[in-house]
Image (cartoon, rainbow, N blue to C red):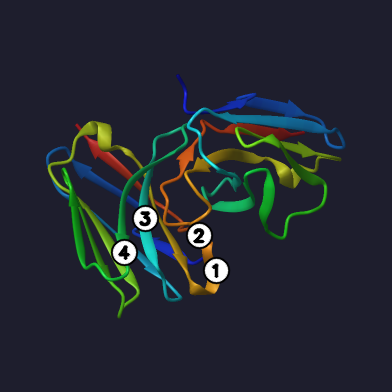
Amino acid sequence: DTAVSQTPKYLVTQMGNDKSIKCEQNLGHDTMYWYKQDSKKFLKIMFSYNNKELIINETVPNRFSPKSPDKAHLNLHINSLELGDSAVYFCASSHSRLAVNEQFFGPGTRLTVL
Amino acid sequence: SQQGEEDPQALSIQEGENATMNCSYKTSINNLQWYRQNSGRGLVHLILIRSNEREKHSGRLRVTLDTSKKSSSLLITASRAADTASYFCATDGSNFGNEKLTFGTGTRLTIIP
């Protein structure tokens, strides 16, 4: 009965590869997010989707492409991985797009690019 | 640029003592939230305080907000070993729209049994 789940939990890959991370929420929320947490624990928003519509797109390289097939799923595809992409990626969801809402986070995906 | 900065960056106290963490931010806000992150886990929402509120309580947590100083504090009373975690403040405000949370740099709290 996990609220927000992500797969995989760990991802180790070579530079230049393409990889995907999947996220699913069973809370019935309208809004989902991708965050990146660096080695200093700084958490920065990357993307946000509301009912499958992209509403926040921070200055993220276009090697990163989110996709939301339905409002319960938000996947993140990364092309041509670079060393600097190594981080923990968190998916989150909230009831609506307003930032006043509590956000529910997944367990994170630790990506290591070698 | 970072909206919130927590102070101190790290804090170690004995179990049973109170822990206070501070968050400063740069621009006007609508709301401020505090989250906890246990090692290797996702963030968990603790409490929200609105810009027109000065203090809020939830169990052993007490949050204050001073909009004139652009700062907030989180007090955890009677700390327990299970409180060991990183704590983040997050703000949303007019400069960032009301759809985006901007997280601070976090305080790593260690409770010594």
Residue B18, can we see it? yes
Q: Work out how far the residue at label 1 is from the one at label 2, CA to CA, in angstroms.
A: 8 Å
| Residue occupied by mark 1 | B96
Mark 4 or 3, nearer chain start: 3
Callouts 4 and 3 on one subunit: yes
Q: Which of marks 4 and 3 is in front?
A: 4
Q: Do the residues labelled 1 and 2 touch (CB within 8 Å)?
A: yes
Q: Work out how far the residue at label 2 is from the one at label 4, CA to CA, in angstroms.
A: 15 Å
Q: Nearer the viewer, mark 1 or mark 2?
A: 1
Q: Which amino acid does label 1 sit on?
A: Phe
Mark 2 or 4, nearer chain start: 4
Describe the element under mark 2 as helix, strand or loop. Answer: strand
| Residue occupied by mark 3 | B33
The chain identifier of the residue carrying mark 1 reads B
Q: Work out how far the residue at label 1 is from the one at label 3, CA to CA, in angstroms.
A: 15 Å
Q: Which of marks 2 and 4 is in front?
A: 4
Q: Work out how far the residue at label 4 is from the one at label 3, CA to CA, in angstroms.
A: 9 Å
Q: Is residue B113 left or right of residue B49?
A: left
Mark 1 or 2, nearer chain start: 1
| Residue occupied by mark 2 | B102
B102 above or below A17? Answer: below
| Residue occupied by mark 4 | B50
